[in-house]
Each structure stands twice: as structure tokens, then as C-alpha cells.
Amino acid sequence: MTDARSGFWDWARSVVEHRRAQSPAARPGQLYQTSTMDALLAGVYDGDATVAELLRHGDFGLGTFNGLDGEMVVLDGTCHHLRADGTAVSAAPDERTPFAAVTRFGPGRTVSLTEPANWAEVTARIDDLVGSDNVMCAVRIRGDFTALQTRTVAAQHHPYPPLVEATASQAKARFTDVSGTLAGFRMPEFEQGISVAGYHLHFLTADQRRGGHCLDFQMSSGTIEVAQLSELHLSVPQTEAFRSAALNAADTSDQIRRTEGGH
Ligand SMILES: [Zn+2]
């Protein structure tokens, strides 16, 4: 990069960082997202947004950490770092993320689940409740799970492989008879590539000690809360890796199915 270009770049980055520092906390109905699924698929695993910054924009959400070092779940204003060994700890404010989405959860519609239900049944209930495929929703499901399967991505090293390769070695965990919370989003098909179209849910046990990206579940009872979102604030990394990444692959949907699970 020439001096002139790198000078411009330094200036542009300082403007963006200044604006981010000033940006007001999000209100309910607004989804704040840093980077895109396309970028994650392309191996852009280092972002510049910090956990502290994310938490200014929401108290609920999900994502991953720089280097693809585990899964993130944000619940009640706490950012949890779910490691590849299945354990969960509170994330430090200065940890960074290459992909995350948060909102200030609520107000939402609530449904009590009194009969056993699996992924397909629970998501069908939510789809009925929302009544449109074109609406973004935050979804919080608290309850007792008779079976639940998660995966957790493992830290990657340079040169970063694409996500389909990185997730091939993901650690999977099976939970039985566990209480906890599924937190995430239902996104419309037209956001595939920016986000994960359909349901994307991360799990945290009630004791906040284990969790991961949910692949499947069966629950015995619980509560479903759905909050509709009307705005998407997309913040993209001010990094050379993002600027030079080859985005918008022709097989984005197929890659997302392979990396995020079959639902
Ligand atoms: Zn995930």
C-alpha cells in the first residue's frame, strides 16, 4: 500500500472509531451486527469490535471471538465466552469479535411450552407467532432440555482456512437433562450471507458453565420469547483482511448449511 493510501486508511479508521465511540446505545427493535457471515465464511476471523463496544449496543445476542476462538452468547448484559472444551467464562471487555449480533431484548411475545417439543416444533410455533418470513426476530428459549447438541469452533491459526474447513474439526457436545437458555435470532432469507437465514441459536446452561452453538435439541418444557426487530445496524471491520476478502461466494447458502448446521 502506498503512503497516500495508508494515510487515507489511517484517517478513515480514526473517523470510524470516533463515530463508534459516540454511537448511542441501541433501543429495542434494533439489531447491531459487526461484520457478515460472508466474511466469516471467507476466513476473516479477526475483527476490531470489542466486547465492551458490543455491550453498548445490546444485552442479548451471539457471535464468535477473534481467531474463531469459541462461541459467544450474550444474555442479560453479560458476554459469555464458550470455549472449544465446552466450558464457559465471562468474556473480558477488551476481547474482540470478527462476527457478532446483539440487541436490547424486548418487549416480546411469550409462549409457554408445556409439552415436549423438538427444534422443528418449537421453530414452527415461533413462525406461527410471527406470521411472516420477512421479519427479523430475537429468540430466547428458557427451559428444560432432555437432549441438546452443540458445537464449538476451535481457535484457528494463520493462514486462516475458510469456515467450511475450520468447522470440520469443531468440537461437538451432547447434553442430556439440562436446564438452560437458547439465545439467538431468526433472520429472513434475504439476509442470507449478511447473517444466517433461518434460526441461529447459541446455548448456555443455567449454571452458566457450559454451552455452544446449538445444532439440535429436544425440550420437555419451557418458555419461548420472541421480540421482533425492525432495524439492522451493520458495522463492518476496518481491517485490511475484510477489505481484501473475496465475499459473496456463489454457494453461500450451501456453505452456511455446512458450517452452521442442517436447520
Ligand atoms: Zn453460531
Image (cartoon, grey):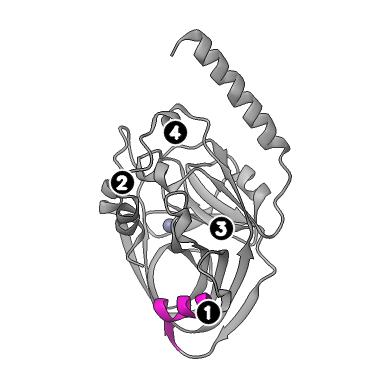
Give the residue pinned by disc 1.
128
Give the residue pinned by disc 4.
242
- Does residue 125 show up magenta in the picture? yes
User: What's under tag 3, amino acid-wise?
Assistant: Gly
At x 43%, y 84%, the residue is: 117
The CA distance from mark 3 to mark 2 is: 28 Å
User: What's under tag 2, amino acid-wise?
Assistant: Ala
Q: Is residue 147 above or below residue 20?
A: below
Q: Is residue 108 above or below residue 70?
A: below
Q: Earlier in the sequence, mark 2 or mark 4?
A: 4
Give the residue pinned by disc 2.
250
At x 66%, y 49%, the residue is: 57
Please provide percent x and percent y for residue 85.
36, 56
How many C-alpha atoms fall within 10 Å of the one at disc 4: few (<14), some, or many (≥20)?
Answer: many
Q: Are marks 2 and 4 in contact (CB under 8 Å)?
A: no
Q: Earlier in the sequence, mark 3 or mark 2?
A: 3
The furthest residue to the top: 3
Name which quarter of the figure residue 116 lies in: bottom left
The CA distance from mark 2 to mark 4 is: 18 Å
Q: Which mark is residue 61?
A: 3
Q: Does the closest atom of ligand 1 sit within 8 Å of the Cβ of label 4? A: no
Mark closer to the observer (4, 1): 1
